[in-house]
Image (cartoon, grey):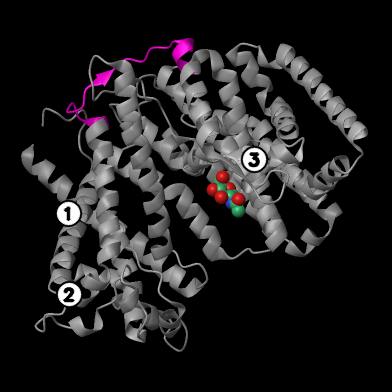
Amino acid sequence: MAFLTAAISSGQVTFLISFLWSLIAWLYAEFLHSLRGSPQLEGSDTVDEESHDPKLQKPLQPHEDDGAAAAANGAAAGGAEDPNDGAKPDGDVLSSSGGSGGLGGMLDSMARSGLVSCLLLRPRALVQQRLVLRQVVEFGALMAWYFVADRTTLVPHGDKSYSRDVFVFLFAALTAVAVGTSLRAFKIPLLLNRPQTEEWKGWMQVLFLLYHYFEAREVYNAIRIFIAAYVWMTGFGNFSYYYKTGDFCIGRFVQMLWRLNFLVFFACVVLRNSYMLYYICPMHTIFTVFVYGALAIAPQLNNHHGWLLVKILLCAAFIFVTWDIKPVFYVLWSPLKFLLGYSDPRNPTDDVLHEWYFRSGLDRYIWVYGMLCALMHPKASSLLKRIDDLPALRRHTVRALVLAACGVAGYVYYITIYVRPKYEYNQVHPYTSWIPITLWIIVRNMTPGLRTFSLRLYGWLGCITLETYISQFHIWMKTDVPDGQPRSLLVLLPGYPLLNFAAVTALYVLVSHRLFDLTNSLKSVAVPHSNNGLLLRNLIMMAAGGTLLWCAVSALYSTTSRLWS
Ligand SMILES: *[C@@H]1O[C@H](CO)[C@@H](O)[C@H](O)[C@H]1NC(C)=O
């Protein structure tokens, strides 16, 4: 077809079939729902829970509970190509995974799952899963928008152009709005509290995105530092969590992997892209796994400060051996070439692991430093507290001295490291990115007032960074071809670059936010937090269902193409 910019893959057809199936199931469910209460509907008496209706929700009976879980199952199945199963209330799960059943029990539980019931269009299951089906359909529709916006000529594209004036103006205007409308106080002046790190992520993300949109090459080095700061937060946040809670629960860990990779998986399928096009995702995934590993292996050592320090040093040594010695890196990662390989179609390379080596290498140590900072967090907090408690004159003097020291350090860093040209800068980035990050943390947290206040607008944007990161390629800018870099801009209002920017950005942020919500709600449907038997069953169902459908489509595809030729 003339408006497509590339051939269609069997993965895309698989997605389309799943999407159409879930669309039919959902429409049928809405239809059944509208008949609710009419006596001829099979099982209608049992299906009267509706989450918006508190009156109906109260007298929840056991089997209704069951149904809600089933709904979850159906949902995932539809939108994506992955069939998946719901997060059932534990009661149901126990009966299926425990006991004498074993494999038989698991198969039985699969047969009774919401996914299978919805596949078979069982009316009762459909009505119960209606809201989940709706989410699946919405997710599928947003993925279809990705495709239409990026891979067809239906939406025109425009060229990027950079003006420092516009770039800085947009950031300044947004910050002014954030200060004017969204300044919030956190209850306790905690060092690096959650709202503050979210705000930090948010404003960095805005600059990162504007850098891409306007191709603001002059801020390249700053953007590298921002990416490092995200990876630092991965080390810091995850270490703090495991250190404080000691919760190595598999369900939660899988939920985190889902959160990081659900959207990117579908973006890859729908747009025929490599995972590495979105390098932030594999990078955060792998470093998250490393932090988990560092603390989950020999967890009894986590109670001793000294042993934790040893673990952190071992992480640094591990990175040194597996990244700094390049042949080791290539040997270790070449089995995963199919997943981590990347070659820009407009600038092809034979060394498909280079992109992974380069991207992950830039920030290979900073997550370790993040763990170290998390370990030192209590000490740093009490130090800040001691400064806060000093008599006024000494307090001001100490703060002024600290700030002056930071200023000097920042200036020296700036003139010796930051100003280097791109390639030279990248050479030293892995060993120096901790400097601006540390300086920023100190300055941002110097007084209780600074620690307490944060800008909620940036915090809000900071929560959806993953979605805005992935979406920018396709529904804000355009890549046009599989694995292409986003070289051009999406145009809805030709001839008005700034108005177009405003309109496209509004739509893009809205869609990103919906994708964030949908990722989370489908996550709770598909990945049970605390039932490993059910988790295993769901993962098997999703993987097996998706693979089976994909194989069937591929077989059909090759047969038809043979017939054509
Ligand atoms: C761990 O890191 C990942 C990736 O940055 C993040 O999504 C997740 O929220 C982190 N977990 C915690 C507990 O901070």
| Residue type indicated by callout 3 | Phe
Q: Is mark 1 within 8 Å of ligand 1?
A: no
Residue at screen point 44% across, 48% down:
261
Residue 134, numbered circle: none
In this rendered view, identify the residue nearer to me: 143 or 521: 521
Sequence-wise first label, 1 or 3: 1
Quadrant of the image occupied by residue 219:
top right
Mark 1 vs mark 3, foreground winner is 3
Disc 3 residue lies near ligand 1 with CB under 8 A? no
Query: Camera-side residue: 6 or 288?
Result: 288
**Residue at numbered disc 3:** 453
Q: Which residue is mark 1?
A: 20
Three-letter amino acid code at disc 2?
A: Pro
Residue 305 drawn at (x, y percent)? 84, 54
Which residue is at 44% across, 17% downward? 215
Q: Position of residue 14 (x, y in %)?
A: 23, 51
Q: x%, y% of residue 282?
A: 50, 41
Q: Quadrant of residue 229?
A: top right
- Horizontal arrangement in the rendering, residue 166 relative to residue 392 (left or right): left
Q: Tell me, yes or no, if residue 197 can be seen here.
A: yes
| Residue pointed to by mark 2 | 123
Which residue corresponds to the image point at 59% horizontal and 29% vertical from the top-left?
226
Q: Quadrant of the N terminus?
A: top left
Question: Which of marks 2 and 3 precedes in the sequence?
Answer: 2
Cα separation between marks 3 and 2: 52 Å
Residue 107 as seen in the image, left or right of residue 238:
left
Range of the magenta residues? 150-167
